[in-house]
Amino acid sequence: MADTIPLKYAQSLLRLAPVPRDQLRAQLTAANLPLALLETQAVPGAVIPVEDYGRLFIHLVHQLQDYIPENAMDPEDTRLFSAYRMMFQAMLHARDLRQALQRASVYFRRMQSTGETFAIEEDGDLVWCRFVFDDATDRSLVAPENFSMESLHWLPGMTGRILSMAMWHRVCGWFIGSFIDLHAVEMREAPEDGKDYSEVFGQPVKFGTHHDAWAFHSRYLDFPIVQGEPSLETMLATYPAELFRISPEDHSLAIRIRHLIGSDFQRAMPTLQDVAERIHMTTPTLHRRLKEEGTSFQQLKDQCRRDAAINFLASGEYTTAELAELLGFSDSSTFHRAFKKWTGLTPQDYRTQHC
């Protein structure tokens, strides 16, 4: 997984902050965040750790909440956290992104009593994810800060809607292990003065349209869900950092394929042909490109399993037999041999020495 994202994305997020530049400088210093965020333009190739991006996001959410009138806050908002976890669980066990989004749409309609919802509509080769916000209460749909933190509330207005839609874009990509290239982003309202939203989505935003929505190619709907229960827990616990580990800036084919393999090995492992189709390559071209990068599809599958096994061992929650099942091995002895081949140690020896 990528541990950094382009600095320009973090700078775009920071421009949503409702405070003067000198105050921002003091806040970044206090939060131990890089002052390079304040540069007018990012140096080409400059990056920021995803953990710093996550802290910047949470800082911004808290800051924006300081500007929300007290009567705009609903004490019951924080009770939705468990409902969101249930929704993500339903999406996690879907067959592919199409089914995951269908389940999310149904769950969200059941969770809300005020009419907010979203739906996917297929239009030829495009899929529109349309968001319907409740204008009466002016709260953002599926407010992203509620995914993992019970102490945060809804963000109203354009900023809340932009962040909600952007986080849903990232959530969808996270579930399938692939950054989703957007074809269009449309908003009903006019933009707020001085706010730049283009890099939030990696796509220019068109304002004054008939709906709040973004569109992507329909091929992504058939991408299978590649995450598992442990990675869901990590995503919720570190939100939103994990969502930005999959970046459009990743040029390494090996990294892209590792994302597509994912972390749920109780599902059928994708074949070389499956992966080639998802990234629009022939299998011979994919094989050749991986060879040029000094690796192979089998090595990447082994690396994903090895990394998952090490993470499971570090948690101390699983026996060798349970690990073998979680990683898709037929029995404990097969897993035992594979792990020793990967690390030079048995699972028990590795746990003793490193965990």
Image (tube, grey):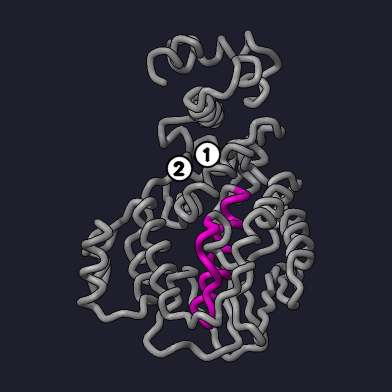
Q: Residue at x 69, y 13 (%)?
A: 331
Q: Earlier in the sequence, mark 2 or mark 1?
A: 2
* 160 magenta-colored: yes
Q: Is residue 295 above or below residue 318?
A: below
Could you tell whether 322 is left or right of 288 in the image?
right
| Tag 2 and tag 1, C-beta contact below 8 Å | yes
Rendered image: mark on residue 258: 1
Closer to us: 236 or 78: 78
Q: Secondary structure at mark 2?
A: loop
Q: Is residue 260 above or below residue 118?
A: above
Residue sitting at 57 percent across and 11 percent down? 336
Image height of 155 relative to 206, above or below: above
Residue 85 visible: yes
x and y percentages locating residue 99 in the rendered image: 77, 54
The answer, for residue 299, to whether it is visible in the render is: no
Question: In the image, which disc is placed on residue 1?
Answer: 2
Name the foreground residue: 299 vs 38.
38
* Amino acid at pointer 1: Arg
Find the distance from the CA under tag 2 to the CA under tag 1: 8 Å
Range drawn in magenta: 149-176
For mark 1, does the 10 Å Cα neighbourhood hold few (<14), some (14 to 19), or many (20 or more) residues?
some
